[in-house]
Image (spheres, rainbow, N blue to C red):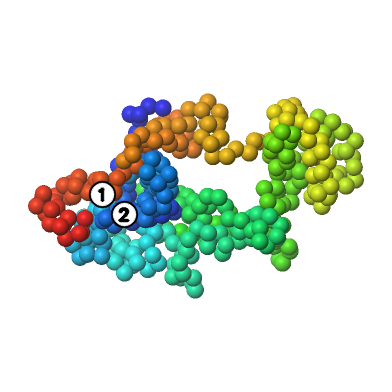
Amino acid sequence: MTQTAPRPLDGITVISLEHAIAAPFCTRQLADLGARVIKIERPGSGDFARGYDQRVDGLASHFVWTNRSKESLTLDLKQPAASGILEALLAKADVLVQNLAPGAAARMGLSFQSLHQRYPRLIVCDISGYGAGGPYEKKKAYDLLIQSEGGFVSVTGGPGDEEMAKAGCSIADIAAGMYAYTGVLSALLLRDKTGLGSNIDVSMLESLVEWMGYPMYYAYNGAPPPARAGAAHSTIYPYGPFPTGGGGTIMLGLQNEREWALFCEKVLLDPALANDDRFSANFRRSENREVLRQIIVDGFASLSLDEVVARLEEAQIANARVNDMHGVWQHPQLKARDSWRAVDSPAGELPALLPPGRNAAFAPRMDAVPALGQHTQGILEELGFTADQQANLAAGGVV
């Protein structure tokens, strides 16, 4: 990949009224493709995700992950003097992304209907917990709450009610951010055809419910939903974690009867087990999973993790080691594919993963994580503000 090759979104300007995860995750993907993203933050404090933790050399882990390659402009949108600055930015922008509190953007005159009259080519992407309209429109929404409302928690974790579990990452925010990202891309393509901007309404709830398609259809028409099965698959077996000798854990998965026969022959060294009536089809193996689990655990007890992996590989059975985060940082496949880059930040250089979906025609943009207000002066100069005017704005707490 050559750094001088044009990127798909070169020349596209995105203004983002964003905080936390969903909108910043969306706009970071746009920045990866070359878009100029101007992140508007509250003077003094900024995006509240900046204060979540200090795990990355004093910076917050969520913020570092979702905010590289952006420009930070501090602007107090509640002050009248800020509106002229925002309007000047929007007049030159292609996209506005916002995930303010429900109704806040409209109260500031930033609804699509209002903006479309002034800037007909502007694309407006609204991200919220529950979407516009309906009884939940103004309800506060955080990732865990959407995981609960969307049914994710109900099918995740162990079998007892007290063992329900959330995802270990912000899955509802990520889902909404990715649908917002693809929505903006499609709106840019549509504008090429019509000459007009359009409005994208993304809800975290609908984004996550779309991802719940399999368990929802499994429970169609009142049928029992999939049982919570921890790290195992709720309806396919054996598919999940098994202990090995020496305290290791292997994750394996069987998808069909051919693999089941090979597993019995080459891994458990018990070909006759494949014809046991209790295990002769997936639904029977799932029904008798406790008995089968004990057979597998006993078979692995005298083998090290590496020995189990070797047998599984010989049998061409899908398997994986259960890595912790330290293991992921050191993953040999990521190293072999040269998946890491260094990006600058207020704390110095930090490692960052190349965006998935590599395109051989261009290199993704991977610029610095911005300090709060780092680009305020430059953006105001670009808009024609003199040094005295900037000083007055700063003195008044506008920027």
Q: For the point 31% across and 69% down, which residue is it?
A: 107
Q: Is residue 159 above or below residue 54?
A: below
Residue 267 percent coordinates (x, y): 79, 32
Q: Residue furthest left?
A: 388
Which tag, 2 or 1, sits closer to the chain's start? 2
Q: Identify which residue, 311 or 56, lies in the foreground.
A: 56
Quarter occupied by residue 22: bottom left
Q: Is residue 192 above or below residue 108?
A: above
Quarter occupied by residue 166: bottom right
Residues at badges 2 and 1 in contact (C-beta under 8 Å)? yes
Going by the numbered disc 1, the residue's amino acid type is Gly
In the picture, the quarter occupied by the C terminus is bottom left
| Residue pointed to by mark 2 | 46
Q: Identify which residue, 28 or 328, lies in the foreground.
A: 328
In the picture, the quarter occupied by the N terminus is top left
Residue 224 percent coordinates (x, y): 73, 63
Instruction: Please give the label number shown on residue 373.
Output: 1
Instruction: Please give the label number shown on residue 168.
Output: none
Q: Identify which residue, 3 or 301, lies in the foreground.
A: 301
Task: Please give the count of numbered marks on the rendered protein.
Answer: 2
Q: For the point 40% across and 46% down, which residue is it?
A: 54
Residue 115, can we see it? yes
- Left or right: 368, with 296 as reference point: left
- Mark 1: few/some/many CA within 10 Å (<14, 14-19, 20+): many
- Left or right: 372, with 184 as reference point: left
Residue 96 percent coordinates (x, y): 33, 55
Q: For the point 22% across and 61% down, which residue is it?
A: 83
Q: Which residue lies furthest to the bottom in this view?
A: 135
Q: Identify which residue, 228 or 162, lies in the foreground.
A: 162
